[in-house]
Amino acid sequence: MLEVISKETGNKEMVINMGPQHPSTHGVLRLELVLDGEIITKVRPNIGYLHRCFEKYAEQMDDYAKVIPYTDRMDYVSAINQEHGYVIALERMLELEVPERVEYIRVIMAEMQRIASHLLGIGAFGLDLGAFSPFLYLFTEREKILDIFERVTGARLLYNYFAVAGLMRDVHPEFKTDTAEFVKTFRPKIKELNDLLSYNKIFIKRTANIGVLPEKVALNYAASGPVLRGSGVEWDLRKNDPYSIYDKFDFEIPVGTGEVGTLGDCWDRYMVRVKEMEQSLRIIEQALDGMPDEGDVMEAIPKRIRPKEGEIYVRTETPRGELGYYIISDKSASPFRVKARAPSFVHLSMLPAISKGSLIADMVAIVGSIDIVLGEVDR
Amino acid sequence: MLNAVKQSWLTFRSIFTGMGVTIRHFFGPTVTLQYPDEKMELPKGARARLYVNIDDCIGCNLCARACPVNCIDIETVASTQDVDLGKTSTGNPKRFWLTRFDIDMAKCMYCDLCVHPCPTNCIYMVSEYEYSEYDRSNLVYHFSNLEPEMVAEVKDKAEKEAEQKKREREEMMRKKAEEKAQKELEAKKKAEEESNDKEKGEE
Amino acid sequence: MTEYVSHIHPVAAILVHAAIPLTIILVYALVAIWGERKIAGFIQDRLGPMRVGGWHGWAQSIADLLKLIQKEDIIPTDASRFLFKFAPFMMFAASYAAFAVIPFSSAYVGSMVNIGVFYLLAVTSLLTLSIIMAGWASNNKWSLLGGMRSAAQMVSYEVPTIASVLTVVLVAGSLNLMTVTEMQSGNDILGFLPNWFIFQNPFLIVAFIIFFISILAESHRVPFDLPESESELVAGYQTEYSGMRWAMFMLAEYADMLLLSLLGATLFFGGWNSPFGDFMAGPLWGFFWFMLKGLSLVIVMMWIRWTLPRYRVDQLMHICWSILIPLSFVNLVLTALWEVIF
Ligand code: SF4
Ligand code: SF4
C-alpha cells in the first residue's frame, strides 16, 4: 500500500508512517501521511494491529454468558458500557423483566464508567497537545472511580459485572455513600480542569478551528456520540431511544456551540465531553436517590440462555457513541452471529475527510479529539 | 492593535490561572503509594487470583465447563467401593479422586464465571496479586493434593475396580446370555418335542 | 581570582578557567534533572524519584548517568556516521563555550572580553547548527522534521532575544557583562530597591518579558518545545540517539537553559549583586546570589513546562514575527527615547 501511495506522490512530498508505535496514536494505529513540508495532503489509517476476532469468538463460545467478558475487551476503557448493550440485547431477545434495583445499579455504574472514560479521553487529548499535568490530575480522579468499581465488582478494568437480567454480585453496603462522596469531590475538579486546560488560550489556539467536522459530513459518516454532538446535533440515545431506565432521569444533552471557533472543531468535541461529565454526575445523583435498598440482584438471572430463533439489533450510548449489537440466534446455546457496530471504527473512517490540509501537530489533535480506542476499532 | 493587546492580556491571564492551579497542587498532598513499602489494601472480593479449596471439591467439572478460555484442567477418577471420600463441608458427598486440578493463571482472564456455578463454593477469587514468575509454566497452579504414587495407586485401583466391574458385568452378561441360550434351548426342545409329538400323532 | 590565575602558567590558567564552568554545569545538570523530576512530581501530586540514595532519591541523576554510560552506543545503519557522532558534542560545546563570559561573581569571570554579550549570542547560535546536524544525520524522517523545526524556531527567536538584550546594552552602554553587572550595584531606586535594570525603567520590564519568552523558545521549553515534542515527532532530533550521546544532548539542553537564565539574571536582575546593598555582599555571596537568581528563572521555566500545552509550529512563528519582533523594536526605540529624556 505504501508503494502505491508513494508512486502517486511527486518529489515534493514525503510519505511518513505515524505509528503503530507512536506516542500519540492511542494504541496501535498506523497512519500513513503524505506530507508536503508539514502539511498533510493525504492520510490513510491502517488498522488491524489489535484484531482479536471478537465476533468469531462469540460464535465459538458454547454459552451466551461467556461472551460478556469478551465484550469488555472491545473498548477496554469503558467496559461496563460495552456489557450493558450486550445484556440488554439478550434481555430483549429472551423477553426478560429486569429487577428495578438492578437497573439502578447498572445506570450508576454505566455513568461512572462514562465519566472514567471521558477522563481518560480528555486527559490523553491534553497529553497529545503537550499538557502533562492535567492528564495526571484526571487520572487521579479516574483512580477513585476504579476504586469504587473494585469494591463493587472485584476488578479494576475488565469487570464482567453485568449478567443477563441481573448482576454478578450485589453492591457492598457503603456503595451509596462512596459514590455520593465521589460525586461531591469530583464537581470542583471539573472547574479546575476548565481553569487549567479548557479555557487556556494556548489550548484553545491548538484546538479551535482545527479538524472541523460539519454537521452534514458527520451525519453522512454516521458519526455518533460526542463527535456528532460536537457538531451541534442533539442526538443522544439515552434520550432519543431510551433503554434501561434512562427515561426516568432528568438531564441535558450538551452540544457543541462553536464558542471559541467554528462549530464542530476539536475544542467543541472536547467540551462536549467535559459537559457530559457534569450531566453524568446529575444522573448518578438522581439514581442514587431512586435506588431501592432491598432486592436480590441475582434472582432473575436465567439458568439457561436459549433465545428463540431470530435476530435483534440493540444500540446503546457508550462514551464513544452508538454501540450496536446485532445478534442472530439459531436456538442453540451460543449465538449464531454477533456483530458489533463500533463507534470508534466509524469515527476513524472520517479521519481522512477532516484532516486533509492540516499540519502534523493538528493530526495529533484530531486523533485525540475523536477519542478512539483501538480495541474497539479492531475488535 | 487594541484587540492584540486584549488577546495578549487574556493569554497571560489564562496562563497565570493555570500556573496558579499547578502551584496549588505543588503544595497539596501527593497520592503516590511507595509500592513495595506501602501496599494498597485490596477490598474484600477483589479478583486477583483463583484459589481452590480442594477438600471441598467434588470434581463435578462445572467450573471447567463455565470457563470461556478453558484454563481449568480437571481429571477425576471414580473412587473405589472400599474407600469413602467423605463429605464436603457443605454436605455434598464426594465420589471422585481429583487426580488433577490445574488452573493456568497465565490464561485466566479473571472473569469470575467459574466461581458462580460451583455447587460447593470451593473455587473462589482471593486478593493475592503478587505472583509474577519468570517462567510462564510456573503460573500453572496445581491444586490437587494427591501424591503421584497416590494418583497411580488410585488410578490402578480404579482401573482394577473398573476391570472387576467390567468382568462382573461381562460375567453377568455371560450368565444372562447363557440363561437366555438355555431358555432358548429349552424352548427349542419343547418345540421339537411338541413337533415330535405332533409328528407322532400324525403317524 | 582572575588576576591570580593569570599569574601562573598560561596552560594551567586555561585549564582552571575551563574546569570552573564545567564543574558548575555538571553539578547543576545533575541537580536540575533531579529537581525537575521532583518539581514535576509534586506539581502532578506525585513524589518523583524516591529510592536512590535515601533522602528523596537525591542520587537518582547519578544513577541515571551511570546507566547511560553503560548503554550500547547505537548508530543507525544509514546514518551519516561522522555527523551523527559529532552533533551532540558540538551542541554541548556551543553552550559550554558561552559560559566563558558569564561573570559568576565579582571576583571571577572566565574571560573579561569587552564584547561579552556579542560573543555569547554568536556562540549559542551554533546550537541550531548542531540540531540540524543531528536531525539530518540520523536519516530519520521524524528527526529531520524536528531538526528543521528547531532551525526555524531558533533563528527566528534569536531576533527578539537580541533586540531585548540590546535594550539593556543601550541603557548600560557596554557589551561587557562584568561592567553591566557593576552598573547595577547599590540600592537607590525609591530609596530601597536595588539598582537592577528591571526596576530602572518601565520599558526594561517589557524587554524582560520578551527576553523570557524568547529564551523559553531558544532552550526548547514548553510551550515552545516543538523540536522534541514527544507526542508529534516522537522525540524530534533525538529520536535515534541513545546512551551517552543522548545524555550529551540532555546535558547541553540543561546547560543552555542555565546559560540563558544566567544571562537574564545578569542583564535584568543585577547579576552577583546582593539585593540588600552591602549586606551579604562579597565574592562568595555574589556567587550565591547569582546562582539563586539564575536558578529561580530555571524553576519558573520548569513550572511553566508542567502547566501549559505547547504551541503549533506556525503559531510559534506567528508569535515571534508578528508580535515579539515588532514589539521588541518599538521597545528599543522607546527605551532610547527614555534615556535621552531622563
Ligand atoms: S476466572 Fe474466568 S478465565 Fe479464569 S478460570 Fe475462571 S472462568 Fe476461566
Ligand atoms: S465446580 Fe467446584 S466442585 Fe465442581 S469441579 Fe469445580 S471446583 Fe470442584
Image (tube, rainbow, N blue to C red):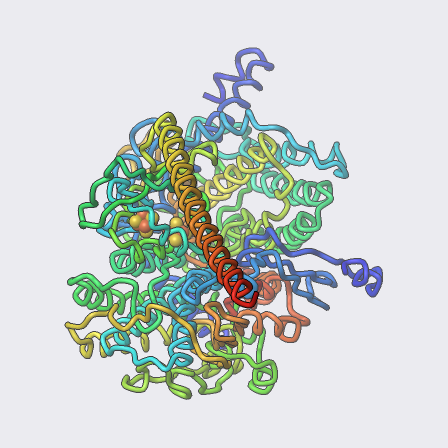
The residue positioned 53% from the left and 13% from the top of the image is C7
Q: Residue at x 52, y 66 (%)?
A: B201
Quick check: B172 above or below A279?
above
**Which residue, as the protein is rendered here, is positioned at the far top?**
C9
Query: Where, by quadrant of the figure, is residue C184 drawn?
Result: top left
Label tally: 0
Closer-to-camera residue (A138/A251): A251
* Residue at horizontal 44 percent and vertical 27 percent from the top: C62
Quadrant of the image containing the C terminus of chain C: bottom left
C94 sits left or right of C302 in the view: right
Quadrant in the picture for the N terminus of chain C: top left
**Residue C132 % position (x, y):** 69, 45
Is residue B195 positioned above or below C131 on the image? below
Q: Is residue C177 visible?
A: yes
The residue under the point 63% across, 61% down is: A47
Where, by quadrant of the figure, is residue A191 drawn? Answer: bottom left
Q: Position of residue C229 (x, y in %)?
A: 56, 52
Q: Is residue A163 left or right of residue A40?
A: left
Q: Nearer the viewer, residue C277 or A292?
A: A292
